[in-house]
Amino acid sequence: MKKQFALIALFLALFSISASAQQVWTLEQCVNHALTNNLQVKQQMLMVESAEADLLQSKLDLLPGITGNASHAYNYGQTVDRYTNQFATSRTQSNNFYIQGGLTLFNGLQKLNGIKQSQLDLMASQQDADKLMNDMSINIATFYLQALFYKELVRIRTNQLDITNQQVDRMKKLVAAGTMAPGDAYTIEAQYAVEESSLIEAENNLDISLLTLSQLLDLPSSDGFDIEVPALTIEGDPSIVANPDQIFTYAQEHMPEIKAAEYRLKSSEKQLARAKGAYYPSLTLSGSWGTGYSGASQIQDQAFPGEPYLIGYAINPEGSTYYDVYANSLEYTYKTKSWDDQINDNNNQTVGLYLTVPILNGWQSRTMVSKSKISLDNSKLDYELQKMQLRKTIQQAWADARAALKQYYAAERKVNATRESFRYAEQKFEVGIMNSVDYNNAKKDLSNSESEQLQTKFDFIFKTTVLDFYMGKPLSLKR
């Protein structure tokens, strides 16, 4: 039974993977899947969790620091007992218990600035995660459109190959009937071979682009993976969203790379404030409690009579003689003072305020301040560089979109002209007033113009999609 259940589970898992791989993916599905499952995104989210832990720790640093220790030891040989202040020569057991706590009341606001810095570092890390997701989304959109381009190119070249195949069949019949020279048939067949090679190349490029896209999604297999082909048309006079300055004004307020640089700039300011805090004195409230036990601490146990001892002399009442005077003595036995009594008797507490004034520490504080200033200047430059790079990217994408649209219109006019030219060439070829070489040249011109138009079409769609993305719109091919 266990083996059967294992086989069923394995079959269901394989079926699930196969079904997932064979579904037709939209651009939105690809982006959502990548943002949820991509390993790089998961790694970046772990960095965010690490920043959250740093922030929590910086807040917990405001709490008092408390330490405690306990010891149980035996001493052999002569030593001075810490509780009796007497020499102990035999084996002596000792126990010590100690708790100490301290609370920083003031240290130049270093801890408070540390909390603010950790908060800013966390926000920067979150923006880094958003930046990675944006880059991942645009990268997926790039390869998605590339796959769509090759799908369309395969369709175009398949249609061209079908037309050429029809001409090959027709030419064979004309050669057999003696109305066309065999050389023309060979020329058409050669053209068929060239177009077939071009179709295979386009199909290979399509397979590679689909493979690359499936790898970006971290799919276990690319078998059966395919994408949806939306209706992508450029009709009328499509306008390009806003202008570069308007797009940049919006993007610099919302793009995560700008926000991350801004947060790191503010974090560097707090780091400088923390470094300057080392110049100030620090005030600490500290307290402690301790007690202990010593086996050398003895107390009287029992008393019993001992030998009389001479304490002096007395005069006989007659005053003629002296006699000795003795007193009775007591002998004592001793026992170790009980553990509970010693713990109570040896109990001690301390509390105090401690002021530490920095005087000279090898110039370390000044060095940290200098390095913090350098880090702040570097953060300012990075912030400006990020804005400059964003502006250049938007300007380039906007200029490329305008150029692609102009090229598309030019290519569209060229396609219309070459399509009409090829229609006349085809009619002439069919009635035998055009040779196969001129016919193939006309067909090549049509093929090249269609490929060029297709390229400019997808180039324009991609650039405008990116510009829309910078304006806060989600990546989508639905227009």
Image (cartoon, rainbow, N blue to C red):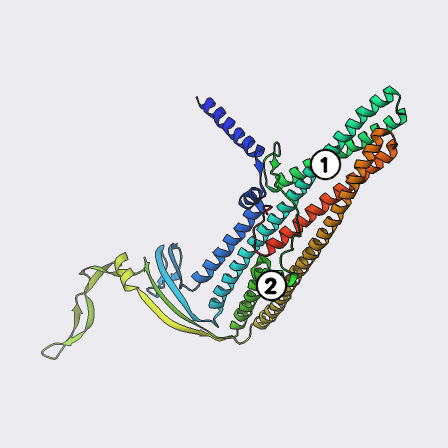
Q: How many residues crowd around disc 1 within 10 Å: few (fewer than 14), some, or many (20 or more)?
A: some
- Percent coordinates x, y for residue 124 in the rendering: 55, 59
In the picture, the disc for residue 249 is 2
User: Helix, strand, or loop for circle 1?
Assistant: helix
Outermost top residue: 176
Question: For the residues marked 2 and 1, what is the alpha-carbon distance in whole angstroms?
Answer: 41 Å
Identify the residue at horizontal 55%, vertical 56% (top origin). Answer: 127
- Give x and y (percent) for residue 96: 36, 59
- Decide: is 328 above or below 152: below
- The reply to whether residue 190 is in sight is no
Q: Which residue is painted at 35% across and 70% down in the image?
A: 351
Task: Point out the image quarter for the N terminus.
Answer: top left
Q: Label 2: few (<14), some or many (≥20) within 10 Å?
A: few
* Above or below, 322 relative to 81: below
Q: Is residue 332 left or right of residue 246?
A: left
Question: How far across and how far down the image is residue 471, in percent?
Answer: 59, 57
Look at discs 2 and 1 and give the one toward the viewer. Answer: 1
In-front residue for pair 161/418 = 418
N-term-proximal mark, 2 vs 1: 1
Residue 477: assigned label = none
Which residue is at the far bottom?
319
Amino acid, disc 2: Thr
Q: Nearer the viewer, residue 444 or 375?
A: 444
Q: Kindly check if marks 2 and 1 are in contact, taking CB atoms under 8 A apart as contact.
A: no
Quarter where residue 292 is shown: bottom left
Residue with the mark numbered 1: 156
Left or right: residue 36 compared with residue 172: left
User: Residue 34 at x, y = what percent?
Assistant: 57, 44
Look at the image and tell me whether residue 364 can be seen. Answer: yes
Query: Callout 1, which amino acid?
Result: Ile
Note whether 445 is above or below 344 in the view shown: above
Q: Secondary structure at mark 2?
A: helix
